[in-house]
Image (spheres, rainbow, N blue to C red):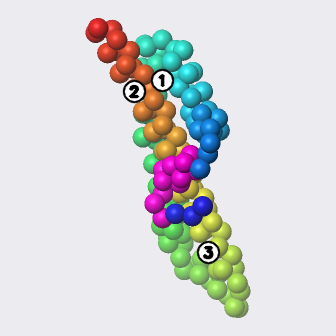
Amino acid sequence: MFSFRGDAHKIYLQLKQKNDIKNDRQLKETADIKSFYQSIDSETLRLIHYRMIKEQNGLGIIPLYVTSIPWLLFLFSSKLQDVLFQNGNILWLIFVTVYLILLTASTFFHFKEKAWAALHIEMIKDILHYRDKDDLS
């Protein structure tokens, strides 16, 4: 099922086609995560929340590292060009292919990790919000 509307719309379309939404694997996984967080006391959950925010903010190192590789290689560009382009060698093609694969994979993993961190953070915030609201009542 291909769509330019993103993964959220894809999930909507998949759920819309199912007869029993409650047995969806992804929803069960999300419910398991929520159930686990609900079983933890509020103070520990706040500490977990702080740690999750730290992890989410630390995710930026992956793209920074990957995008810094060309600048490092730029320092050695004349020697690198001699090695890559000598005698019609196709080493440059291998180098560019490997670099693009690494760049694509690290970017993909970066955004997947960021999305999972956001899921956990939002879930913890919701649980703490409802607990705080109940404490005020």
Tell whether 88 sits left or right of 3. Answer: right
Q: Are marks 1 and 3 in contact (CB under 8 Å)?
A: no
**Residue 68 visible:** no
Residue 98 or 1: which is nearer the viewer?
1
Which residue appears at 62% of the width and 42% of the height?
19
Please check the rendered image and state whether residue 50 is part of the magenta-colored stretch, yes or no: no
Is 96 left, or right, of 60 in this rendering?
right
The mark nearer the N terminus, 1 or 3, is: 1
Q: Amino acid at mark 3?
A: Val
Camera-nearest residue between 63 and 24: 24
Residue 48 image label: 1
Q: Is disc 3 placed on a helix, strand or loop?
A: helix
Q: Give the residue drawn at x 53%, y 44%.
A: 113
Does the magenta stretch mainly form a helix, a strand or a loop? helix
Residue that numbered label 2 is attached to: 125
Q: In the rendered view, tell whether residue 73 sits above or below residue 40.
A: below
The C terminus appears in which quarter of the rendering? Answer: top left
Residue at horizontal 46 percent and vertical 60 percent from the top: 5
Q: Is residue 73 above or below residue 49?
A: below
Asked if residue 5 is among those painted magenta in the image, a careful observer would answer: yes
CA neighbours of label 1 inside 10 A, class few (<14), some (14 to 19), many (20+): some
The type of residue carrying mark 1 is Ile
The earlier-in-sequence mark between 2 and 3 is 3
* Amino acid found under the numbered disc labelled 2: Lys
Q: Which residue is mark 3?
A: 96
* Residues in magenta, as a range: 4-16
The label nearer to you, 2 versus 1, is: 2
Q: Quadrant of residue 31?
A: top right
Crowding near pointer 2: few (<14 within 10 Å), some, many (20+)?
some
Mark 2 to mark 3 CA distance (whole Å): 43 Å
> How far across and down, in percent of the image, does residue 2 sit?
57, 64
Dot 2 falls on a residue whose secondary structure is helix
